[in-house]
Image (cartoon, helix red, strand yellow):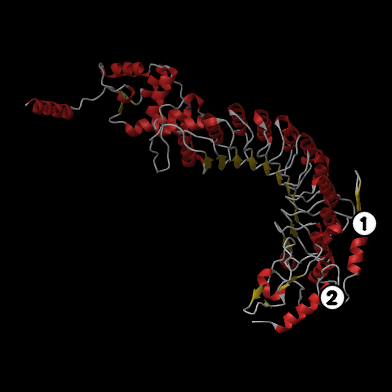
Amino acid sequence: MLCNEGHRQALKARKERDKTQYREYTGDLGHPLLYAFVPDHTLLSDDDSHTQLLNCNLFDALDYKFQLSSLPDLKHESYQIDGDLNFAKKEKLKYKLNLDEIQLNDSDYDSELNDIDRFINKQDPIQVYRQACKRYQIHPYHSVIEGLSRDMIDLSEMSINDLDLKAICLALRIHTQMKYIRLSANNITAQGCAYLQETLKDNYKIEELDISKNPIRTEGIEILSLLFINDETKISIIKILNLSSCELIDLDGPIIRKIIQGGDMLQELYLSGNQLGAITCKNIGLVLKDAPELRILDLSWNMIRDYDIRPICNSLKNNQSLERLDLTMNGLGNQGAILIAKMLSSNETLIELDMSNNRIEKDGADIFASKLEMNRRLKKLWFGNNNFGTLGSLVLLKAIDHIKSQVEYLNIENVLVNDDFLDLYTQINQYLRSLEVVHGGIRGRLGRIHSLVPGFTIMDDIDLRFLDTKSLHAMFQRDPFKILGRMAKEGRYDFLKALKKWDLEEHGHLTYSIYIIDFPSAIKDAGINLDKTLHFILWNYLKKIAKRGSVSYLQFITPLPKLNLKASIQKKQKSVNIKK
């Protein structure tokens, strides 16, 4: 089990390490690495209490992913090598921060590249990265080595700090074909942003930069904004920039404005989870209408209130590119919903809109729905976790029921709906278009059974006066007589009297039937106004149910309760038996 040669070399390296103040790597970087210390899980103890080294080629054999936060030493019996873990923190950043610009001294990069061993290939980014790790006394990340052989490097949640990023940037200066850099959820600060900016300023391949969930703050975003300064000799080609949860504040609005203004090819900008507000919205609004490529703007989980959204809404009236706007968890309120609704009435590009968790009540939902009817482009709407209740949800669905509406997905999570909502939803799916709805549950009559067959039922408590024309036509087509009765009842028309009048004129006595030719005249005499579509639907229905040219109008007469003779006879027999 024991690799004698590896064990002997490890002991020799340990003795040499004792003579130095800081731990360092041994071996030639052009060959498989031999470390003076290895992770604990690669060490096994035999029966003689001696430590066995399984293999000395860690990269090729163990495929171990090294982490900076875990640096276990090679242990042999009770002896352990101690090192200065704070050495990496002693490196100083050589950049000068001003309010207008940031100047980075590049001498550190040149000196590091010049100090690389002459035995390695300086055009190989992997060898350059390993040599940089040796110099900075840090572990190489296996994910970095894999990424340097492709066009994407994903180091999300890897505990990368500024010194780790410095070594990576040295390799990226050689790897000029890198397109996607993802550094989400690490410990990168403004110092790391300086390394990135100096590395990527001459790179014309990078399309995505994700530095979200890192505490870069104002200094960091100001450094990164230098990548979006376009002039005659330089142009930014970054298409996706993620700055979510980077501890940005509202005063960073002018910097964000520079990024949008300079990013001629910027398509997606994520600013979620910061503290942006009125100043940022004002700056974004100034340049949003002139952003020809921007498709997605994420401003969720910020501090945008009421009228703060006005500049962005004004810009979106003339914007010809933005397709998705995320405003989740901002506290826009009713006033913010009204401003966005006015924008939707004239916007022709927005496809997805998220307004969840914004303290919108029924009044705001009603006005929003009235403007939503005018929109011919929106396909997905998130409006959940707002306090507009079942009536507000029904109003939204009625707006979507418009014949020219394109909405295919409605999310009103944690908002209750009633049976009327379900009826109209089923009707839209049956007669208009496919619609997917996510809601918070059904509130209404308990025990009501809904048919599994696509369709809808007409409830007695639906107020027809609040239905739009198309919905009324669809319901009338389903059951014309029942809707006529409802219209007569709600309008307080004496429809039954008009029907009896025509019945007496035709037959001389009441037969409770009327010729289909005279049925529209009876409706007119009762005062019920039907448009041409309803007349057409009614006429076809009358011809369908007519018998010998007449139809019965008993349905419009309130039926008396029927006497069940069999039941009464059975009750009498039981009572007689009891007496006996």
Tags 1 and 2 touching, CB below 8 Å? no
Q: Quadrant of the C terminus?
A: top left
The residue nearer to you, when weighing 496 against 16, is 16
Could you tell me residue 113's position as x and y percent?
89, 67
Q: Which residue is label 2 attached to? A: 120
Identified at 39% across, 41% down, the residue is 451
The reply to whether residue 455 is visible in this rendering is: yes
The residue nearer to you, when weighing 128 against 174, is 128
Q: Quadrant of the N terminus?
A: bottom right
Q: Is residue 372 left or right of residue 427?
A: right
Image: 23 above or below 189: below
- SS of the residue at dot 2? loop
The residue nearer to you, when weighing 6 against 325, is 6
| Mark 1 neighbour density, 10 Å: few (under 14) some (14–19) many (20 or more) | few
Image: 124 above or below 194: below
Image: 47 above or below 289: below
Of mark 1 and mark 2, the one earlier in the sequence is 1
Image: 261 above or below 375: below
Identified at 56% across, 43% down, the residue is 409
Give the residue type at disc 2: Ile
Report the disc number at residue 105. Answer: 1
Give the residue type at disc 1: Asn
Could you tell me residue 223's position as x and y percent?
85, 50
Q: Is residue 371 left or right of residue 209?
A: left
- SS of the residue at dot 1? loop
| Mark 2 neighbour density, 10 Å: few (under 14) some (14–19) many (20 or more) | some
The residue nearer to you, when weighing 275 against 500, is 275
Could you tell me residue 161's position as x and y percent?
78, 57
Q: Is residue 34 left or right of residue 235?
A: left
Could you tell me residue 235's position as x and y percent?
84, 53
The reply to whether residue 30 is visible in this rendering is: no
